[in-house]
Amino acid sequence: MPTEQREEKQLEASLDALLSQVADLKNSLGSFIYKLENEYDRLTWPSVLDSFALLSGQLNTLNKVLKHEKTPLFRNQVIIPLVLSPDRDEDLMRQTEGRVPVFSHEVVPDHLRTKPDPEVEEQEKQLTTDAARIGADAAQKQIQSLNKMCSNLLEKISKEEREAESGGLRPNKQTFNPADTNALVAAVAFGKGLSNWRPSGSSGPGQPGQPGAGTILTGASGLQQVQMSGAPSQQQPMLSGVQMAQAGQPGKMPSGIKTNIKSASMHPYQR
């Protein structure tokens, strides 16, 4: 009897530890599912990785509890349903958190099943048969090919990550000088830094003290002045002749345009 009591106490302690680990795992799963369903727009990849890491750690702890030397083999324990009823069971609802309202003939095969479903067993047998048909050499070649593909993929991912990190850490090379740009904008917009210096000989006529004033560089106005001043004696007879010729034609006003054109055609520098 003491041995049986000790085994029962050990079984109860193992069940309590197992239930505690399963409850933690269930809470983590519920929290992660809630994030996926309600916070997917704000969810980041590092947060998803943290959730996966938490679930992985809890599963490893659960496996350690099951493999502990003081944990009895649960597979040797047999569960027999004592009462089956189609009526609603409040205690069962509370223990299962509302998932199992009744303990009837419909739910017992699912909850007390010790083997997978027949369909799952059939698929597992088919996979085992297909794996047995492949020879050792062919299986080794497939394994090597898969490992090579995985290695190439990991190498590409690592290269992309290194390039992204180096690109983010390396500052962008500046291709312009802000001081020169500001100076250029100020010169164009406000004339800042521009001088009023002009080269010699670029001034207009009539300015004393500068050589070349009144020459051909002064433009057409200076040239006309030189021409008009160079032939005063020739303009007067020509003008009087035109006026006398036009005076004999009644109804016409005398015009000096032709006189100006003729006088302009007489260049003072002709030799």
Image (spheres, grey):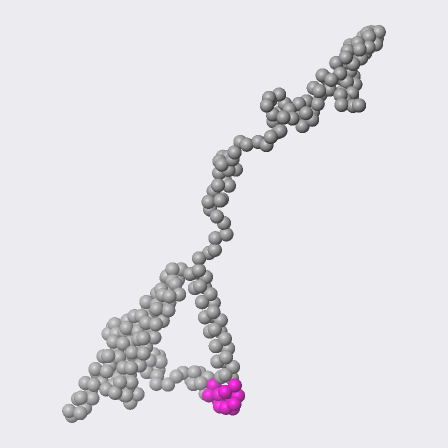
Residue 25 location (% of width, % of height): 30, 73
Q: How many marks?
A: 0
Q: Nearer the viewer, residue 227 or 58?
A: 227
Residues shaded magenta: 126-141
Residue lying at 24% horizontally and 74% vertically, measured from the top left: 91
Q: Nearer the viewer, residue 127 or 216?
A: 216
Task: Please state, as top left, top right, bottom left or bottom right, where the N terminus lies in the image.
Answer: bottom left
Vertical order, 259 against 105 (above or below): above
Q: Does the image show residue 195? A: yes
**Residue 24 part of the magenta-drawn span:** no
Residue 131 location (% of width, % of height): 48, 88
Q: Main secondary structure of the magenta part?
A: helix
Q: Would you say 136 lies left or right of 203 here? A: left
Residue 90 location (% of width, % of height): 25, 72
Vertical order, 168 against 207 (above or below): below
Vertical order, 119 against 32 (above or below): below
Residue lying at 69% horizontally and 26% vertically, measured from the top left: 216
Residue lying at 52% horizontally and 37% vertically, measured from the top left: 188
Q: Nearer the viewer, residue 70 or 118?
A: 70
Q: Nearer the viewer, residue 143 or 37?
A: 143
Residue 117 location (% of width, % of height): 40, 83
Q: Within the image, what quadrant is residue 218 found in?
A: top right
Q: Within the image, what quadrant is residue 59 found in?
A: bottom left
